[in-house]
Image: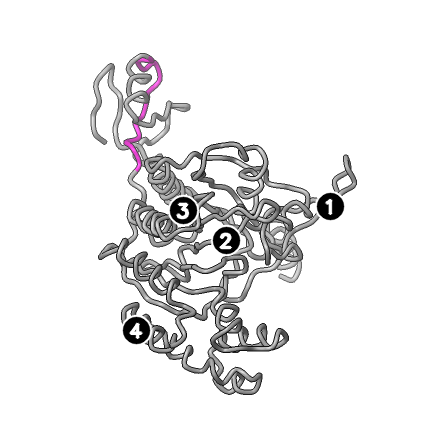
Amino acid sequence: MIWGRERADMTNSTDLLPEGLEDRLPASAARITAAMRACLDVLNGHGYDRVRPPLLEFEDSLASRMVGLRTRTMFRFVDPASLRTLSLRSDITPQIGRIAATSLQNAPRPLRLAYCGETAVMKASQLDPARERLQLGGELIGADTVAAASEIVTLSVEALHAAGLTGISVDFTLPDLVDTLAASALPLEAEQIEAVRGELDTKDAGGLKSVGGEAYLPLLYATGSFAEALSKLRELDVGGALATRLDGLEAIAASIGDKARITLDPTERHGFEYQSWFGFTIYAEGLRGAAGRGGTYRIGGSDEAATGFTLYVDRLAEAAPNAKGPRLVYLPTGHDQQAAAQLRAEGARTLAQISPDEAPVILGCTHRLNGNTLSEL
């Protein structure tokens, strides 16, 4: 009995995947693929050209393109060719910034780029244990305007709708809010700014007072439904330091209309390490955690303005409807090759007979080819 258990344990251990990684079996892979295609079709339809950056890059190159990018969370290797440190990307956005600043630096602006690819991190959080993600997004480079931000937000909402998700909500934030207020309206010493940011992020009123940020307490309550939270922020903005930002938020919200529910949490900074004046998180009904994030930022090296969004396709596919694949046609031995080719050209999938004892229905076939005609199984 003990020997059997040890043998089972030994066999199972060789088949285990690392923590935070998983296989995607046919049904799950089909949902992910369908969601990916739907989202990419939306981006393509709005003039976003797809690029495919490499999985690995030099660590210093990735770090230089985006302020706040933490390379210590990435898998790192020594390149045997150059002896420089390589990093396995944890975010594709910095790579898009590099492409825009180098290979496409002379392309007309605004530049619209789309992407989709795998990313990985060394360690995930308890709330989101996945260490590998399929990241898809669009970047509008060369414009830092309300119009650019509006296009990006509405595009992300449209992409989720196209993937079959419902109950979509968008939560706005102002990533540089503390810096803006500390510079004039609510002055802070340089060493206080990060502490105040941290306490606002954790919504800790007592902690905020202890670090000298008592004047920032009203920001903790300027959250919730967009109209109500925006009104509270306008009441707090006596000196007008936030006026242009708040006007911008209102215009962006108007562009979304009734396509999504809109909320506002102006002090939220989780996931907004490099965004500047505007950021947003997007959610959908039935989805654990966020479907994606986006906002405005500056590309390191060129300092060019950009606005973009990222969707986590494997995550949002959990709430997407089951993919309805094309019919699967069973092709018996000696079938009409030309008829089978025509079926595939029309979008059907075919499954050729291999052995005489096959059961087409058990194999998942929906139809059978008889001569050059189909019969339903």
87 in the magenta segment? no
Percent of width and height locating residue 311: 42, 50
Tell me which corner region of the image, top left, top right, bottom left or bottom right, holds residue 360: top left
Residue 297, which numbered label? 2
* Secondary structure type for disc 3: helix
Which residue is the site of mark 3?
28
Label 1 crowd bin: few (<14), some (14–19), many (20+), radius 10 Å: some
Q: Relative to 263, say whether 149 is above or below.
A: above
Q: Please state which amino acid type lies under the numbered disc 2.
A: Tyr
335 in the magenta segment? yes
* Secondary structure type for disc 4: helix
Which residue is the site of mark 4?
231
User: Which-is-in-front pick, marks 1 and 2?
Assistant: 2
Label 2 crowd bin: few (<14), some (14–19), many (20+), radius 10 Å: many
Percent of width and height locating residue 371: 25, 14
User: Label 1 to label 3, Cα distance in Å?
Assistant: 35 Å
The range drawn in magenta is 325-337
| Lower position in the chain sequence, tag 1 or tag 2 | 1
| Lower position in the chain sequence, tag 4 or tag 3 | 3
In the picture provided, is 207 more to the left or to the right than 79? left
Residue 44, which numbered label? none
| Lower position in the chain sequence, tag 2 or tag 3 | 3
